Image (cartoon, rainbow, N blue to C red):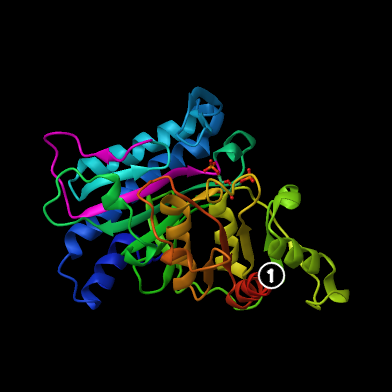
Amino acid sequence: MQELGTTLSSFIINEQRKLGSSAGGTFTGLLNDITIACKGIANLVNRGDLAGVLGVTDSENSMGDVQKKMDLIADQMFIDALENNGHCAGMASEEQDDVIHTSEGKQRGHYLVTFDPLDGSSNMDINMDVGAIFSILQAPEGIINPTAEHFSRPGTEQIAAGYCLYGPSTMMVLTTGNGVNGFTLCSSIGEFILTHPNMAIPEDTAEYAINASNQRFWEKPVQDYIADCVQGEEGPLGKRYNMRWVAAMVGEIHRILCRGGIFLYPIDERNREAGGKLRLLYEGNPMAMIVEQAGGAAYTGYERVMEVKPNGDPHQRVPVIMGSKNEVMKVMEYHKNA
Ligand code: AFP
């Protein structure tokens, strides 16, 4: 019989033991709750139209995005999985206006979880990559029903972050602040198995990801950087660049973890007032933690994403420039010189 390999749960238990953590059991339980949600979502995403989960609803989220059927289903699957075992004190979801309290009568745990239950959901209907992103914070002592303020903490306070990519295979990528590890869902036994230990982002790259259709709205430093990339070997950067756009941040960051690259969703003229396009708590902070833990860098153009001061709004937005360290620092130079 083929060897099973290291499951996600046994990996976490061993990691907690090595760190001498007293929270081992409940933290492992919390991660287990998240994997249950992700496995359930993976199953529906994989069956697609056969499961009747494609298409839109007639509702919008607080950001004005039309919600897809699968956005709402994935959101509820996260909430149910996190509520069931009492490891979580409260949740905040990109799909909900307000933070979510654990239902009356349910046990409350020591952690706060924020999540984007279905990142890149416009890809659902065209059978392309989608994913889930999550971040875990320690809950403040003695708080029964956490408020938005309790979730509004800088990314440096995250104790774990991860994403689940529903691609050709389903992968969970996780950091608990001690490197980044990737696990592939083995459908025959229903377990995530460690397949990508110690993921590391190459420091150099010649591949960028940006929605180039927004070019006329970007700030000058980003305009200048991309213009120089496009010039290739003849330009000041002296190399030929490749470009990719998955339109799901989970897909972009996964590619960068696997082979390097830089992902930009900068401030532009249309999103300047909102502070950017991507959400700090649901996308910016967790992905910045993963990228930094894999040896990459994550900035807004002006400061580290994880040091952005939260403004109390769980839907606060942020510009992001993240990926291979030397390339991100190059873009930072464009900002400093502007
Ligand atoms: P949703 O989470 O609303 O599906 O949005 C996905 C996303 O925030 C991010 O994952 C992508 O990088 C980005 O939007 C794609 O945006 P464009 O519409 O500019 O392609």
Left or right relative to 324: residue 25: left
Q: Is residue 110 rendered magenta in the image? A: yes
Q: Position of residue 173 (x, y in %)?
A: 44, 61
- Residue situated in front as seen by the camera: 8 or 176: 176
Amino acid type of the residue that numbered disc 1 sits on in the rendered structure: Ala
Q: Position of residue 294 (x, y in %)?
A: 48, 73
Q: Residue at x 31, y 67 (%)?
A: 11
Residue 24 can be seen, yes or no = yes
**Residue at 70% across, 57% down:** 244
Residue sitting nearer the eye, 218 or 35: 218
Ligand 1 is found in the corner quadrant, namely top right
Q: Report the residue that reaches farthest toward the right.
A: 234
Asked if one can make out residue 4 in the rendered structure from this viewpoint, the answer is: no
Looking at the image, residue 128 lies above or below residue 2: above
Name the residue: 30% across, 51% down: 151
Q: Is mark 1 within 8 Å of ligand 1?
A: no
x, y percent for residue 73: 41, 32
Question: Which residue position is annotated with label 1?
Answer: 338
Quadrant placement of the C terminus: bottom right
**What residue lies at 24% left-to-right and 67% top-to-bottom?**
13
First to last magenta residue range:
97-120
Is 306 part of what is drawn in magenta?
Answer: no
Front-lying residue, 232 or 148: 148
